[in-house]
Amino acid sequence: MSELVTDQGATTEPQSAPSGEPYRLLFVCTGNTCRSPMAEVIAHDLTASEPHRRLEVRSAGVGAFPGSPPSGGAVRTAARHGIDLTEHRATLLTRREVEWADLILTMSPHHLMRVGELGGGDRATLLTAFAEGGESGSVPDPIGGSDARYERTYRRLEELVGKALARLPDEGMP
């Protein structure tokens, strides 16, 4: 497996889950109302046909207002792809979420910095860097934009999440 680039620029292998435990993946953005919840539901959708894969996926935001609903653009875009995002409620990124995760994938460098401040820097990297083997960059934030902008972000997330899932350890696989 290729290396994980952490917030300090060091590299390491993605950690495995404790024996017998599912692999825990956390997506992080700003408000937890568009990018990270879309990444979360995309991951669930992409792994729905893999019941043998034991994977838990969550999302959180560095500046989330807990309990906030997803943005309308995110809900409409996910629905166009057959995914229901209406039940999602925003979660603030705290040390508890960071400690829960085996791997934390962030949407931009400032999210990565916050994860590091909460003690998860050794298990965190940019989603783009993890998925594309070292390429770095942010996933564009569609908040307040048109549905076309949400669609572009969704399609980018679909590509990145698919690549990221392919790189995860085969936890719970027979």
Image (cartoon, rainbow, N blue to C red):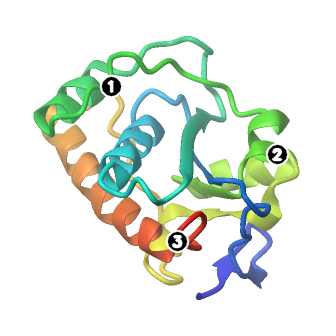
Q: Secondary structure at mark 2?
A: helix
Side of 70 relative to 130 (left or right): left
Q: Farthest residue in the front direction?
A: 174
Which class describes the residues within 10 Å of circle 2: few (<14), some (14-19), or many (20+)? some
- Given residues 43 and 22, the one toward you in this image is 22
**Badge 1 or badge 2: first in the primary sequence:** 1
Instruction: Give the quadrant of the N terminus.
Output: bottom right
Q: Amino acid at mark 1?
A: Leu
Could you say where residue 173 lies in the image, as x and y percent from the top left?
53, 69
Q: Quadrant of residue 166?
A: bottom left
Q: Amino acid at mark 2?
A: Glu
Residue under the point 29% across and 56% down: 158
Q: Is residue 138 left or right of residue 148?
A: right
For disc 1, the neighbor class at 10 Å (few under 14, some 14 to 19, many from 20) is: many
The residue at which mark 2 appears reads as 99
**Which residue does the numbered mark 1 point to in the structure image?**
85
Q: Amino acid at mark 3?
A: Pro
Residue placed at 31% from the left, 54% from the top? Answer: 46
**Of the residues under marks 2 and 3, which one precedes in the sequence?**
2
- Check disc 3 and report its element: helix, strand or loop: loop
Q: Is residue 16 above or below residue 67?
A: below
Q: Name the residue at 23% across, 33% down.
A: 83
Percent of width and height locating residue 28: 58, 44
Direction from residue 62 to residue 29 in the image, left or right:
left
**Circle 3 is placed at which residue position?**
174
Q: Residue furthest bottom?
A: 2
